[in-house]
Amino acid sequence: MRAIAYSIKDQEKECLVLANGKKHDLTLISNELNRHTVSYARGKEVVIVSVYDILDTELLWELKNAGVRKIITRSKTTTHIDLAQATRLGLKVANAPGEDQSTCSIARQTIRNLNAWEAGKCVGKACCCQNVCAP
């Protein structure tokens, strides 16, 4: 899958690259996701965000218009994402629900989410969609 990860810290880069194993086309940038950087998501299927990237109604519309269909947050929480609006727009949302919230564990969960979506499957416990996904 073609994905862009925003707000990437140096320590996250290595973990994501190793977890990915060159399977997905990942773009990793240190910029936060906002109205000035949303254009970088054009042509990507998935955006990968941090808890500090606020995805409100306006930004979700911009992502949808850029062609994004799925969002992964590199956190357990989803309070920074308007899940109701994401659902209305038909955007799938996943998180990193595991107890181990280490950088590399979150990177592995992020890639598992990408793998599941690429295979046409639900991401299971990582699913944050407000509707029932088909397994």
Image (tube, rainbow, N blue to C red):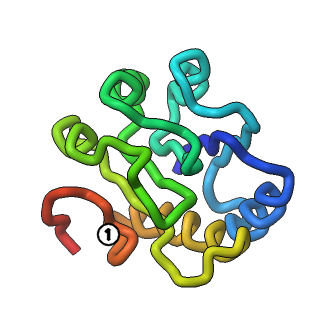
Q: Which residue is depicted at the point 31% across and 51% down?
A: 92
Looking at this view, is 121 or 15 the one in front?
A: 15
Q: 10 Å neighbourhood of mark 1: few (<14), some, or many (≥20)? A: some
Looking at this view, is 52 or 109 the one in front?
A: 52
Q: Position of residue 64 (x, y in %)?
A: 34, 29
Is residue 122 placed above or below 84 in the rendered structure? below
Looking at this view, is 74 or 70 the one in front?
A: 74
Which quarter of the rendering shows the C terminus?
bottom left
Q: Amino acid at mark 1?
A: Lys
Q: Position of residue 11 (x, y in %)?
A: 84, 59
Examine the image and state in which quarter residue 21 appears: bottom right
Q: Which residue is depicted at the point 36% across and 41% down?
A: 69
Residue marked by disc 1: 121
Q: Position of residue 60 (x, y in %)?
A: 36, 31
Is residue 4 placed above or below 21 in the rendered structure? above
Is residue 19 placed above or below 74 in the rendered structure? below
Examine the image and state in which quarter residue 16 appears: bottom right
